[in-house]
Amino acid sequence: MKLENDIYAYEWTSPFENNCNSFFVGGNVGALIDPGLTTFFPDLLKNMAEDGIYPKDIKYIINTHSHPDHFQASGTFTDNDTKIGMHRDEIDFLNKIGSRMYAMFGLDTPQVVIDMPLDEGSINIGDETFEVIHTPGHSPGSISLYWPAKKALFPGDVIFNQNVGRTDFPGGSSDLLKESIMKISQLDVDYLMPGHMGIIVGNEDVKKNFQIVIKHILPYI
């Protein structure tokens, strides 16, 4: 679904099976954010094709973190022309205890060549500038990807619509998640596109969501 010029959203709405929301930034960027589980990736490609987006248009895979429901399908990209990015801390986490997440759910850890290690700061993807924001708490190397030109924030599983990501998985930390949410709450955001649940559109609605989470959720995690 085309959400805004060059921003496409593919929300996962099944109440019976877990997967993540995926997003595609088109134009001269060509970045797929969180491809999800391998078993559901053909469905994502089908939905993207309905919007005129094909595998050849995917130049970058940006992973907000390494949990299976966000990252596993990255293993389907073996074309060297597609760059795969993830934060350095998350790469280290996945190579150590993070792989336990796959065993927990009866999955094989995908073999992925991450040739685009990410650090906090500005990054050029295609001909656009994004901000990589290190937002640990749900996992040690979680990132929120911010596109200043569109005021668009892709926070992965840091914050949702009136909720937050879990902190009881390996590498999780409630204290760090709180710090991360406070950090990204200072951004100027018109589009909040989380890894699960609904998208929030509109600057005031995004601010209201941060206020609700900070006041009613953070004190209890």
Image: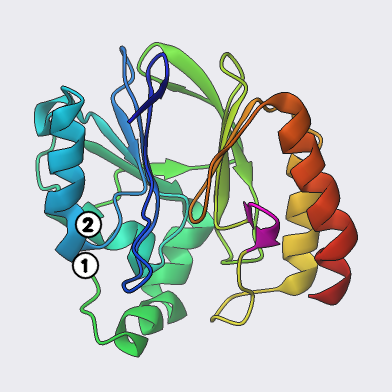
At x 61%, y 82%, the residue is: 168
Q: Which residues are magenta?
A: 159-164
Locate the N terminus and report the quarter of the image it occupies: top left
Q: Nearer the viewer, mark 1 or mark 2?
A: 2
For numbered disc 2, what is the local secondary structure? helix
Look at mark 1 in the image and give the residue it sits on: 110
The reply to whether the C-beta atoms of the residues labelled 1 and 2 are less than 8 Å apart is yes
In the picture, measured across the screen, residue 112 lies left or right of residue 147, that is: left
User: What amino acid is at disc 1?
Assistant: Pro
Residue 95: x %, y % from top left? 37, 71
Residue 98: x %, y % from top left? 43, 75
What is the magenta segment's predominant secondary structure?
A: strand
Crowd rating for badge 2 (residues with CA inside 10 Å; few <14, some 14–19, many 20+): many
Residue 81 can be seen in this image: no
Residue 79: x %, y % from top left? 9, 40
Q: Choose the circle earlier in sequence order: 1 or 2.
A: 2
